[in-house]
Amino acid sequence: MRLGIARTVRLTFASFFIQTSWSFSSLQTLGFVFNLLSGARREHQQELQSIYPKIFNTHPYMASYIIGAILRTHDENSLTPDRIDRFILIAQTSFATAGDLLFWQTIRPALLLCAVILGLKIGIAGPVAAFIAYNILHLYHRIHGLCDGYEKGADVIYVLRSRRFTLVQRVFEFLGAFATGGLIALATTDFHALLIVPLCLIFVGLLFKRIASVIIIIIAIIITLAIVVI
Amino acid sequence: MIAIGAIILGSLMLLDKFAFGEFGISQPIMAGTLLGMVFGDIPSGILVGAGLQLIFLGGLPIGRDIPPDGPAAGIIACSVFFIARPGSSTGQSLALALLLALIASIVGGALEIMARRFNDRLFKNYKQHPACVTRNHLLGLLTAFIRNVCTIAPFLLIASLVPIPEQFPSLSPEHFIIIGIGIGSAHALYLFSKRATFPYIVIGGLCGLALLVL
């Protein structure tokens, strides 16, 4: 059973708005309902509106997998509301963890590090290449996630074991690590560059002690002021 | 006039942070490149964007956590730099851009919390009128845009209306990048240092050193 091109395009466009009305009490719920309605068949729309006022939150790029699966269950009437609830509960947490780890903690920082190094060394081609690579990857998950979710239904959760997650994460971890070392290429050869060492040690200490990010920025402001004045 | 244009452009770019798409265009290095194109100086845009990107590399929007607003800081730093530069030295405008951007990141984080609290009303409206899903949901775009304008406008107006005094301290591009590398490498080590990745950090460091010396 396939989703169809028109529905895939509509749902992909709607997925760009998944977090538009994100709030502390509802998280992504409104975005989730909006996405379901944009892909639901006309006869299911009323039913979907009344079934899903519950709280929903997952990684924005991974929501497509769950939305695809839910649409399939409605098109086929294959799961009871209770089982759909249980599926959403498990899937949103699993995909959120996988997405945070894959995109926020690995792919995005690795590509941004590459963009910074290449941008400063060779110019505009660096950021443009990183931007294209990043968008290919997240659009792949958004579009393919919808199709996979619709094709596999509630079994879509097993794609988390697939190579598109494990292998890609490993590759970008190595790329990120390589770019971490490569940051030294941006320094200068004069003695001021030695300032990098204490700065790095201070902030590594703060990060590993899990100090609040606002305090880290305040410390960055104080250090910047000191460097500017001296 | 330039400041107003930059406020509107910056606010639209900042929608990418969470309200629309999340394509990465609001990340400082991308925003810096784009603003550099708009202001006709791409290398300077990349320089300012790169420095801010390194400082905010680790701002991870995981779960309900709202870190300081790195994307807003990047957009503000680049815009302030380009707006302030004609009336002062490069070093002075860079120092002003960095300081205002760091302050703006904290202000932006606080305003984001307010905007998301305001979005609670949209959800309450939806619960009362379930048929108005699209209207209530897409009103979030307006909330986000207003929040973006409120974050960016004060800093760009200060930069365009208040001239930088002559005795204002200066920050050279080299020192700016050194601050960025110091904080950025800490973030990168925090994210990528594991036993399995250690050899890659060393190889990357050696390649970086070779590139630096050559």
Image (tube, coloured by chain):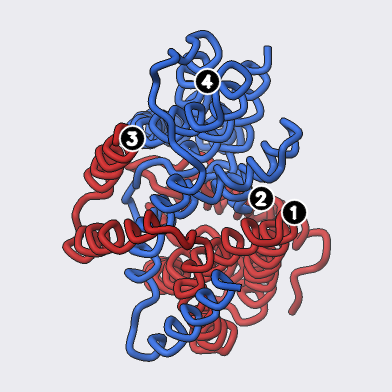
Chain colours: A red, B blue
Residue at left 34%, top 61%?
Answer: A194
Residue A36 in view: yes
Q: Are marks 4 and 2 on the same chain?
A: no
The residue type indicated by label 4 comes to Leu
- Circle 4 SS class: helix
A213 or A219, nearer to the observer: A219
Q: Chain of mark 2?
A: A
Residue at the front extreme of this rendering = A190
Name the residue tied to disc 3: B106
Name the residue tied to disc 1: A10
Name the residue tied to disc 4: B156
Mark 3 or 4, nearer chain start: 3
Label 4 crowd bin: few (<14), some (14–19), many (20+), radius 10 Å: many
In the rendered view, does B163 fall on the left or right side of A93? right
Name the residue tied to disc 2: A14
Discs 2, 1 touching: Cβ within 8 Å: yes
Label 3 crowd bin: few (<14), some (14–19), many (20+), radius 10 Å: many
The residue type indicated by label 2 comes to Ala
Q: Chain of mark 4?
A: B
In the displayed structure, would residue B118 be above or below residue B42? above
- Estimate the spatial distance between the alpha carbons at disc 3 and disc 4, rounded to whole Å: 16 Å
In the rendered view, does A162 fall on the left or right side of A39? left
